[in-house]
Image: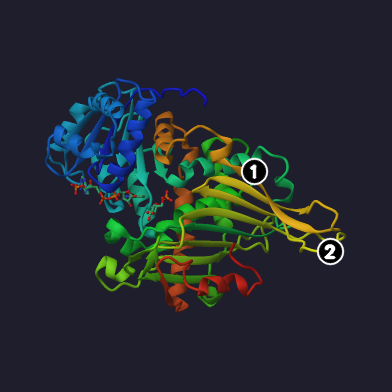
Amino acid sequence: MAELVPVEAFDMVIFGATGDLARRKILPALFHRWCDGQIPENSRIIAAAREDMSTGEYLERASEFVNGDKKAKAWAAFSDRVTYTAIDAHGDGPGWQTVRDALDDDPAKVRLFYLALPPSVYGPVCTAIGRHGLNTKASRIVLEKPIGHDFHSARQINEAVGAVFDESAIFRIDHYLGKETVQNLLVLRFANMLLEPVWNANGIDHVQITVAETLGAGERAEYYDRAGAVRDMVQNHLLQLLCLVAMEPPVSLDGDAVRTEKLKVLHALRLIRAEDAGKCLVRGQYGAGLIDGSKVPGYVEEVGRSSKIETFAAIRASIDNWRWAGVPFYLRTGKRMATRRSEIIVQFKPVPHDIIRADAGVLQPNRLVIRLQPDEGVKLMMMTKDPGPGGMRLRYVPLNLSYADAFEADYPDAYERLLMAVVRGNLALFMRRDEVEVAWRWTDAVIRAWQDGACPLHTYAAGTDGPSQGSLLLSREGREWF
Ligand code: NDP
Ligand code: BG6
């Protein structure tokens, strides 16, 4: 594995430090980078939330993920960098002075404010950071998705954040952009000559993007029941994947070069109208069922109230530009599906003329399967001759690259990569303001189209591939989900 280069020392304030995201993702990510020697000793982490407790109590609680003697020793050293502060980040209480005192006075030291907070307080918290004079030239703000609930709320948040921080200091996280396999999409497309000449409507029949989870709404039901699958997953993760598949080659991997190309794709996404809802949109909500052989309740029983929110969405998206005219992008995501699986499938067109006229086996078009998680890998389905004397017999076989077999190294969690990228100031892995807003405009149109087009909410049993109507999106066009 390549040697890890340490980042420069930083101070980081995590607002919402007692929350699910901070506990499960942010602190473990920082700790793992510390263990690998990437975080310098003179870095500081200021954990902040409203609950009153001592730093010792916080660390005791936060250490639940640390196991083994070696890790416990490293945790003790890491903990020396952490202090806990009770603060109402919305207000003007004494917590702000404590945060100020905990921060290094050096204006050149990188200072990160991580908002692991409900999006409704992003604006007020940024205003408070500005009012308390904590925003230095070396400051950066990290915002979690979703940025808002729709186009208008996203714009309001962006305005409020932008009044305090320059766009070049705003890091909007979509953790899918930090995944190893998602990064590999850029390499696959732009570091190989083979794909690009056929990566367009001449060579490609359609694209499928699936992000399926076996988990239910779980402990985040309060949030999820206001969001649903389209706002929670499609507006950000699935659209970002679509952009990386569909964008033109950027001139470099510089933050703005990549983001400008993604933005062009988002602008070219056709807005779905109510009259097209029946052909383009399917919504579902899980009922009771079986996951890994165990019974699980339906969504309504899980959240304890009646709900019309979708836990599954399938969408036929179109990109109106030269490269992709006539090539459907089918997007699908759901909770409590049969298996956890995120993948991008690029289905190529059939060869223009069949000279093989096989004795057995059907000539099938090439298919590229990019497996994002789990079992990360890339598979190219090819036609080959079945070896032997039995005439021209065809077989459809994979050229297979499995990450587990090809690479020995463990690769870091997306949050580890993203946090180090924030410290380095690398914006390429984060969403720019205009991307987020244009993505919301398309998403709002989807939601309006299914409201105005009276799209029904179908029920599917937990542990299945979603409602059967999801297949109709493709089958009525002579295709199927793979
Ligand atoms: P939680 O509800 O679990 O945590 C929210 C945190 O914010 C708590 O620590 C809460 O602590 C604190 N908080 C709320 N209001 C204030 C305030 N006024 N001042 C200071 N602290 C406050 O949410 P999550 O951790 O799940 O999510 C955080 C953000 O990350 C959200 O925007 C979410 O959408 C996003 N996100 C979360 C993911 C996840 O897997 N959890 C995945 C992707 C995005 P207290 O009440 O004690 O102040
Ligand atoms: C989050 C969503 O952004 O992504 C969750 O809010 C979802 O609902 C999660 O479970 C999926 O992330 P991953 O990395 O587990 O695929």
Label 2 crowd (10 A; few <14 / some 14-19 / many >=20): few
From the viewer's perspective, is 330 left or right of 298? right
Q: Is residue 282 above or below residue 102?
A: below
Q: Is residue 271 above or below residue 399?
A: below
Instruction: Point out which mark residue 359 bears.
Output: 2
Instruction: Name the outermost residue toward the front.
Output: 389
From the viewer's perspective, is 320 left or right of 263? right
Task: Give the residue pinned by disc 1.
Answer: 189
Res. 194 image quadrant:
top right
Determine the secondary structure under disc 2.
loop
Q: Nearer the viewer, mark 1 or mark 2?
A: 2
Determine the secondary structure under disc 1.
helix
From the viewer's perspective, is 267 left or right of 339? right
Tell me how far mark 1 sits from mark 2, CA to CA: 35 Å
Q: Label 1 sits on what residue type? A: Arg
Q: Position of residue 38 (x, y in %)?
A: 39, 25
Q: Quadrant of the C terminus?
A: bottom right
Res. 26 image quadrant:
top left
Q: Position of residue 246 (x, y in %)?
A: 61, 52
Residue shown at the point (37%, 58%) measured from the top left: 215
Q: Nearer the viewer, residue 41 or 14?
A: 41
Residue shown at the point (46%, 58%) measured from the top left: 339
First in sequence, mark 1 or 2: give its number. 1
Q: Nearer the viewer, residue 18 or 365?
A: 365
